[in-house]
Image (cartoon, grey):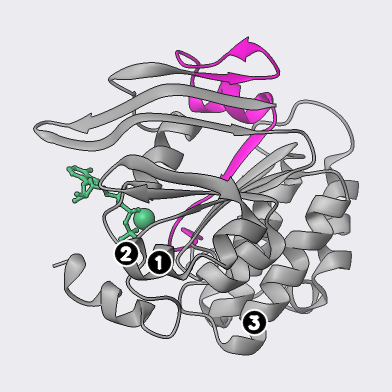
């Protein structure tokens, strides 16, 4: 479905993504793991069309999208749920969901909005409240709900579990599995290695912009050398890798 070849992202002298080859087959959950600064967000932003890759190709169902606008990629069925959720806190829940509609010219948008409310009763109860009143977990549901309104065939999630309570993390991963069962392919960027490998079929590990390992999720999850070498020692210690790297 998604086929990425030789993707390079540069910001001036920073070479954030280096020759990445990656693919997601129809119906798959594929995870991209890597420590802070590994290039995960840069990769997703290049797929979304927000940054123009220095080189490489991106195609969806054989259709070349490397030069396509972000809007055209959304229209082709690719939706990004960005890092940090990026919802509009001064707007209502409903207004936030309507943002997911703006590129739709087809079909019954009202019905799709209702489907999102059916899936997330917490959002339905709060539809006329400002998004700022939502908990972190509810804000993540809103960000995902907004993507669903655009009827994606492929959802890309950038560290969706970041900052969520354990209860919401497990709900989130249940949701990811449900969405996948409903026919949506998923590209999941995570630092919660254990949870991500639990739901994924395959995974890629990025280090300093390069794919250093690509394997089945089952093989990756038994590879402790991997978590120690590239991911800062696994989940319990991933908070440690978060400190400092961003500074
Ligand atoms: N807009 C930008 N301008 C310049 N450099 C950038 C920009 N965005 C990211 N970088 C650099 O590119 C590299 C990769 O960053 P990126 O945000 O893609 O990593 P990441 O894997 O998403 O990290 P994190 O886990 O902290 O979100 C880093 O060295 C970062 O400092
Ligand atoms: Mg990131």
**Rendered location of residue 51, percent (x, y):** 34, 31
| Front residue (pair 229, 59) | 229
- What segment is highlighted magenta in the picture? 58-87
Q: Is residue 165 left or right of residue 128?
A: left
Upstream in sequence: badge 1 or badge 3: 3
- Dots 1 and 3: beta carbons under 8 Å? no
Q: Is residue 68 magenta?
A: yes
Please identify the quadrant where the C terminus is shown.
bottom left
**C-alpha gap between disc 2 and disc 3:** 28 Å
Which residue is denoted by mark 3 in the rendering?
Answer: 168
Residue 229: give its label: 2
Q: Marks 1 and 3: which is nearer the front? A: 1
* SS at circle 2: helix
Residue 225: give its label: 1
- Please say whether residue 92 is visible from this viewpoint: no
| Front residue (pair 114, 234) | 234
């Amino acid at each position: 479905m998604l086929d990425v070849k030789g993707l390079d992202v540069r910001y001036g002298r920073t070479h954030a993504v280096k020759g990445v080859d990656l693919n997601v087959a129809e119906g798959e959950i594929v995870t991209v793991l890597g420590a802070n600064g590994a290039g995960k967000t840069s990769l997703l932003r290049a797929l979304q069309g927000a940054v123009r890759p220095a080189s490489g190709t991106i195609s969806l169902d054989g259709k070349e999208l490397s030069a396509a606008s972000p809007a055209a990629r959304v229209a082709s069925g690719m939706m990004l749920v960005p890092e940090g959720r990026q919802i509009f806190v001064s707007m209502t829940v409903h207004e936030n969901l309507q943002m997911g509609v703006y590129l739709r010219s087809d079909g019954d948008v009202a019905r799709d909005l209702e489907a999102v409310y059916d899936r997330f009763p917490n959002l339905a109860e709060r539809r006329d409240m400002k998004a700022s009143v939502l908990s972190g977990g509810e804000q993540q549901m809103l960000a995902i709900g907004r993507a669903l309104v655009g009827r994606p065939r492929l959802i890309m999630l950038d560290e969706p579990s970041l900052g969520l309570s354990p209860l919401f993390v497990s709900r989130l991963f249940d949701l990811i599995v449900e969405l996948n069962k409903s026919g949506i392919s998923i590209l999941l960027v995570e630092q919660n290695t254990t949870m991500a490998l639990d739901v994924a079929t395959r995974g890629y590990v990025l280090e300093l912009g390069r794919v250093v390992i690509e394997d089945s999720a089952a093989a990756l999850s038994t590879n402790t050398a991997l978590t120690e070498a590239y991911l800062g020692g696994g989940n319990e210690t991933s908070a440690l890798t978060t400190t400092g790297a961003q500074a």
